[in-house]
């Protein structure tokens, strides 16, 4: 068993707090992604897991073993970083075999069997004899993934491994990564700032902001039920709309609402907003019973049959993602409606259950 327990971990650099009292568990055999904007502390947290950095406070526990103060080589974890360290003049096979070379518990035949298996899983058997220096960045990174998992250590850490890989090779690498991880059942922590990558790879995503974990959930839950405005904004392309709302007499009014909503009894806050994903806003050329008029204020951009545009209701601009072309041209009037059951309420940035 190799669950990772991060126990009230803080890291400060002088007066600056890079990681702020993180307390969480990555389950055994789970692929967990650390996702967040630049500077939120992902790399610092990862460096504390790998042993390259020591927490200012708190403990790191791998499978029941306190590793907080152990150096990287004593942690028995595999690691892949943006720039993998490999031996350019050794072959792919030799590079894959290397991590097990000095491990007496793995006999020669077993070593070879494991390397063979990885070559097949990553679909690089034909490159077995090629030298690392002959490979492109994407394939090199594939070998690095293989090398990190081949020792079959219970925990493997990945820090933005696809950053220097071009787009097509990136997809291939992600596919290979998925095959490898579903086969080997190791506990994986994977750092990325790329939401698509996190949504594709992770069993669960830990969303970070300013040194803290904002939400730790399955990808669909993180997307569909963000607990904060930050989460709704950060995930999605573009992110969720937050339409300023007012509360009075037990009801909520907002420019996007044709009729007020009943307000939950415990709704308090200086800043109330109604949240709705751009793809859930309906846009029509003619008025309906629950629609509000708006003006198209942004050129629609088509991506894979969907169109992204913006419509203004007075001063309130709403991002809309429609399946077909918008029913009007720039500057013309459209009619917006929202499915009331899909609306979310936020008070001072935090989600409030609607009922
Ligand atoms: P990115 O995606 O840009 O790498 P990140 O989420 O990985 O960002 P970190 O690299 O962990 O963020 O950095 C978090 C904060 O801590 C940043 O503001 C950074 O400047 C600061 N920081 C990191 N390492 C140090 C250090 N050794 N000394 C001082 N400040 C540091």
Image: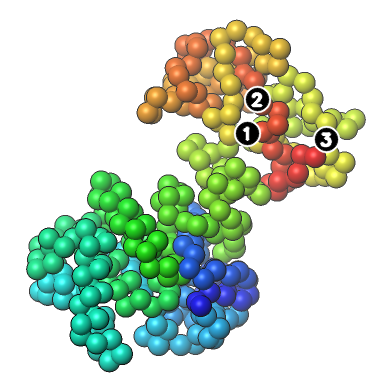
Which element carries disc 2, helix, strand or loop? loop
Which element carries disc 1, helix, strand or loop? strand
Which element carries disc 3, helix, strand or loop? loop
Furthest residue to the bottom? 104
Residue 345 in which image quadrant: top right
The reply to whether residue 210 is visible in this rendering is: no
Left or right, 245 with reference to 333 = right
Q: Earlier in the sequence, mark 3 or mark 1?
A: 3
Q: Earlier in the sequence, mark 1 or mark 2?
A: 1
Furthest residue to the top? 286
Circle on res. 263: 3
Q: Are marks 3 and 1 in contact (CB under 8 Å)?
A: no
Q: Earlier in the sequence, mark 3 or mark 2?
A: 3
Residue for badge 2 = 338
Q: Whole-percent x and y of residue 240?
A: 58, 37
- Point 27% across, 92% down: residue: 104
Q: Whole-percent x and y of residue 323?
A: 47, 23
Left or right, 7 with reference to 133 = right
Residues at marks 3 and 2, CA–CA distance in whole angstroms: 17 Å
| Nearest to the observer: residue 156 or residue 311 | 156
Q: Whole-percent x and y of residue 183?
A: 37, 64
Residue for badge 1 = 276
- Point 34% across, 58% down: residue: 179
Residues at marks 1 and 2, CA–CA distance in whole angstroms: 8 Å
Q: Are marks 1 and 2 in contact (CB under 8 Å)?
A: yes
| Nearest to the observer: residue 10 or residue 194 | 194
């Amino acid at each position: 068993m190799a669950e990772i327990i991060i126990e009230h971990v803080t890291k400060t650099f002088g007066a600056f707090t890079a990681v702020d009292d993180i307390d969480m568990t990555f389950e055994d055999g789970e692929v967990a992604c650390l996702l967040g904007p630049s500077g939120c502390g992902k790399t610092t947290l990862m460096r504390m897991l790998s042993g390259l950095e020591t927490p200012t406070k708190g403990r790191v526990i791998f499978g029941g073993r306190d590793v907080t103060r152990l150096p990287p080589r004593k942690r028995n974890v595999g690691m892949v970083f943006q720039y993998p360290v490999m031996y350019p003049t050794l072959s792919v096979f030799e590079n894959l075999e290397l991590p097990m070379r000095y491990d007496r518990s793995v006999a020669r035949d077993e070593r070879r069997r494991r390397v063979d298996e990885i070559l097949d899983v990553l679909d690089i058997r034909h490159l077995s004899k090629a030298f690392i220096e002959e490979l492109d960045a994407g394939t090199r990174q594939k070998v690095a993934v293989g090398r990190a998992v081949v020792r079959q250590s219970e925990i493997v850490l990945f820090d933005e491994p696809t950053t220097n890989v071009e787009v097509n090779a990136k997809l291939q690498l992600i596919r290979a990564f998925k095959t490898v991880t579903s086969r080997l059942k190791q506990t994986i922590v994977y750092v990325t700032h790329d939401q698509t990558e996190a949504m594709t790879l992770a069993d669960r995503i830990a969303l970070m902001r300013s040194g803290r974990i904002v939400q730790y959930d399955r990808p669909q839950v993180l997307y569909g039920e963000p607990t904060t405005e930050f989460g709704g904004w950060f995930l999605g392309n573009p992110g969720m709309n937050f339409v300023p709302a007012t509360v009075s007499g037990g009801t909520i009014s907002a420019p996007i609402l044709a009729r007020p909503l009943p307000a939950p009894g415990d709704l308090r806050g200086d800043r109330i907003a109604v949240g709705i994903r751009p793809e859930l806003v309906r846009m029509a050329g003619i008025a309906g019973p629950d629609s509000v008029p708006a003006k198209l204020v942004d050129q629609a951009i088509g991506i894979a049959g969907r169109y992204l545009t913006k419509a203004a209701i007075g001063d309130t601009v709403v991002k809309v993602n429609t399946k077909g072309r918008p029913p009007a041209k720039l500057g013309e009037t459209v009619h917006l409606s929202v499915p009331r059951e899909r609306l979310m309420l936020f008070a001072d940035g935090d989600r409030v259950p609607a009922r």
